[in-house]
Each structure stands twice: as structure tokens, then as C-alpha cells.
């Protein structure tokens, strides 16, 4: 460890609506849900990440759990700051004497406003960052899956996160046309909660709906290979008020997610329409790249392939594509200077 490393650290942060990932020294050192638990009386942090997620929707009146990010941007400034601080403290820097100041790169959605950018920058600075850079998520995702964004060749990225779906056509280190829609993982979770209430008269929580999405979530009512077995969902019967269990199949979930996935398809088609013809020709050859947690939804790649008539490539580790790309940009600051926002 050099002397400079004692005073200055470099970290790449994917500050997501659902999960926050941090890279330090080329390793993912933090991978935690973006949630914080606070004491209502003293406003002290009780838990962050997985520990706070265990408490979510199970708290008494003295504890509140907050998800500081909504739709990809900071909704609760104070909670976001406390959460980032706590997650940075999770990094083992090997320096027990004092905390180094950091140079940070943080991912932001492409449809973010100037005010929202300022909120991200201020939160990072308040946690002790010396320099703060920002990078748009579709560019970070493209770098993370190994696309050379500096080439004069068009690539299309669809990054389906928790709060937003980022759709972008990239060439020559820039976004040529893009769309950022608020239909993503959180909307899918809400769709499942609404469906269970309407169809089965059962009230389920956010965590149960999330679990249903992971276990039997599907974009198509008929899956050719490896259909998941039915899942037992537990909740409160709305008629009697007594807890009960319902078996849910993947076909049911495909039906309840249908409208939201259709909105995503429309946004992809709109972005393809806006792409210049030469880049459209490149996309025809190279296809569309899916990243983000939503890319893991069963049957989504097949459904998009049927709709767009283009090859669909799901990233090898879609959840970590954005943070990996941010880490690469951090290592090669000079090379990616043109895509960073300061």
C-alpha cells in the first residue's frame, strides 16, 4: 500500500433503487439492499442493507425503515446520506487509524434532472468525498459488459433496474437517443401485490411480492424450458382477516405483469424508431443487450425477441454490469473523461 492510499481511496458506487453496490480496489466489497432502519425518537441508524431489509414491514412504532431512492433518484436526502455513509464504513480499507477521503464515481439514470444530479453530488460530498464524478447508467452498463463505447458502432442497452428502465443507443462515447421510463422492478412488485389483492382477496407485503417475482416471475404465459414450480404465498385474507396460503403459478404472474412489460416494449420500439439509420443497421447486426436485475425475469428475452425481431443478449451477471462498468471508468479516468459528469 502506497502512502497516497492511506489518505485517498477510489470507490465506484452503483446507487440503485433496490440495491447499492460498491467497488473498492477492483472488488465488489458492498452488495446490499438500498434500505435503512432509523430510530424515530433519536433518529439514529439502527441497521443498513440486509439487516434493515429483515426489519422492513415488520417494525413497531419506534422504528421506521426507509428506502431513500425512488425511481432511480434520491427521494429522502437525509436517509440517503446516512445510508451511503454507513455503506462506505463497511469497506475494509486496512487503515484502522482514520478514514481516507474518497474519489467517487456514482451512476445516475439518463433521464435525471439537474436538481436530482445536485442531490446525488451533495450526498456524496457530505459523506467525505474529495472528488465526485457521475456516469449515466446505460454507458456504465455498456462498459461493464465489455462493449467498446468509443467505436463508431451503435449498441443498444436496456438496463432494467428497480426504479427505472434505461433504454439507450450508444456510439462514440455518447448516448445518441435514449428513454428512461419508471416501469421497472418496483412496478412489477406492485403489480403482483395488486393482482393478489384483486384476484385472490389476499393482502401480501412488498417482501413477499418480491419473493414471488424471483421464484415464479415470468414475462411469458408459456415457458418452453424449465418452468418453475408453483409458489406458496402467505398473506392476510381480506374477507376473514386470518392469515392464509395461496399457490401461485408462473402463468398467473405473466398475466399480471403483461401491461407493464408492454409499456417497456413500446419504449424500446420508440427508441429504435429514433435511432439514425446507420446505427439501426448496427443494432440489427449486434442485437439488444439486457442488463439490470429485471433482465433475470424468465422469458423476457424471448418476448422482446418476438416483438423486435432482433437478437437479445442477456448479460452474464446483469445485476453487477453497471457497477463493473463504473469500476472500469474509475480505473481509466483519462480514457473515459468525456463520459463523466463532474
Image (tube, grey):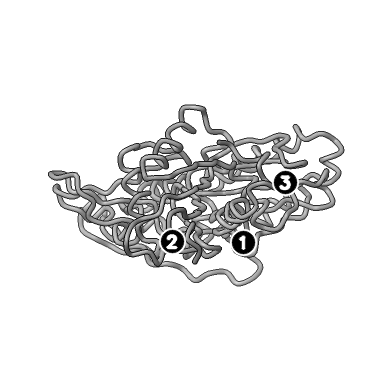
State how far apart marks 3 and 2 are (Cα).
Answer: 28 Å
Of the pair 318 and 340, the residue shown nearer to us:
340
Q: Quadrant of residue 79?
A: top left
Q: Position of residue 61 (x, y in %)?
A: 14, 47
Residue drawn at x 51%, y 59% is: 23
List the residue tagged with mark 2. Answer: 30
Q: Are marks 1 and 2 in contact (CB under 8 Å)?
A: no
Left or right relative to 190: residue 292: right
Q: Position of residue 50 (x, y in %)?
A: 34, 61
Closer to viewer: mark 1 or mark 3:
3
Q: Residues within 10 Å of mark 1 (few under 14, many from 20)?
A: few
Of the pair 109 and 56, the residue shown nearer to us:
109
Q: Are marks 3 and 2 in contact (CB under 8 Å)?
A: no
State how far apart marks 1 and 2 are (Cα).
Answer: 37 Å
Q: Quadrant of residue 320?
A: bottom right
List the residue tagged with mark 3. Answer: 156
Q: Earlier in the sequence, mark 1 or mark 2?
A: 2
Q: Relative to residue 273, is residue 201 depicted above or below?
A: below
Amino acid at each position: 500500500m502506497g502512502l497516497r492510499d492511506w489518505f485517498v481511496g477510489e470507490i465506484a458506487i452503483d446507487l440503485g433503487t433496490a440495491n447499492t453496490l460498491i467497488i473498492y480496489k477492483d472488488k465488489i466489497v458492498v452488495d446490499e439492499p438500498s434500505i435503512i432502519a432509523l430510530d424515530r425518537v433519536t433518529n439514529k441508524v439502527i441497521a443498513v442493507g440486509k439487516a434493515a431489509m429483515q426489519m422492513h414491514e415488520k417494525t413497531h412504532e419506534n422504528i421506521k425503515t426507509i428506502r431513500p431512492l425512488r425511481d432511480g433518484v434520491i427521494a429522502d436526502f437525509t436517509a440517503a446520506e446516512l445510508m451511503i455513509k454507513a455503506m462506505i464504513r463497511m469497506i475494509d480499507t486496512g487503515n484502522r487509524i482514520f478514514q481516507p477521503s474518497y474519489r467517487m464515481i456514482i451512476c445516475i439514470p439518463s433521464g435525471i434532472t439537474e436538481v436530482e444530479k445536485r442531490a446525488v453530488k451533495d450526498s456524496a460530498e457530505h459523506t467525505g468525498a474529495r472528488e465526485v464524478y457521475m456516469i449515466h447508467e446505460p454507458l456504465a452498463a455498456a462498459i461493464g459488459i465489455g462493449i467498446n463505447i468509443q467505436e463508431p458502432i451503435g449498441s443498444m442497452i436496456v438496463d432494467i433496474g428497480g426504479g427505472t428502465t434505461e433504454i439507450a443507443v450508444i456510439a462514440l462515447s455518447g448516448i445518441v437517443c435514449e428513454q428512461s421510463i419508471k416501469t421497472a422492478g418496483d412496478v412489477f412488485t406492485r403489480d403482483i401485490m395488486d393482482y393478489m389483492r384483486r384476484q385472490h382477496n389476499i393482502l401480501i407485503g412488498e417482501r413477499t411480492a418480491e419473493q414471488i417475482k424471483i421464484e415464479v416471475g415470468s414475462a411469458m404465459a408459456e415457458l418452453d424450458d424449465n418452468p418453475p414450480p408453483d409458489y406458496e404465498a402467505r398473506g392476510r385474507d381480506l374477507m376473514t382477516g386470518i392469515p392464509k396460503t395461496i399457490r401461485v403459478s408462473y402463468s398467473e404472474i405473466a398475466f399480471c405483469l403483461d401491461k407493464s412489460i408492454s409499456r417497456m416494449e413500446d419504449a424500446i420500439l420508440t427508441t429504435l424508431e429514433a435511432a439514425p439509420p446507420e446505427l439501426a443497421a448496427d443494432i440489427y447486426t449486434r442485437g439488444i443487450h439486457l442488463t439490470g436485475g429485471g433482465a433475470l425475469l424468465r422469458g423476457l428475452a424471448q418476448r422482446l425477441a418476438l416483438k423486435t425481431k432482433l437478437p437479445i443478449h442477456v448479460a452474464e451477471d446483469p445485476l453487477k454490469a453497471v457497477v463493473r462498468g463504473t469500476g472500469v471508468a474509475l480505473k481509466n479516468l483519462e480514457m473515459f473523461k468525456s463520459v463523466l459528469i463532474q
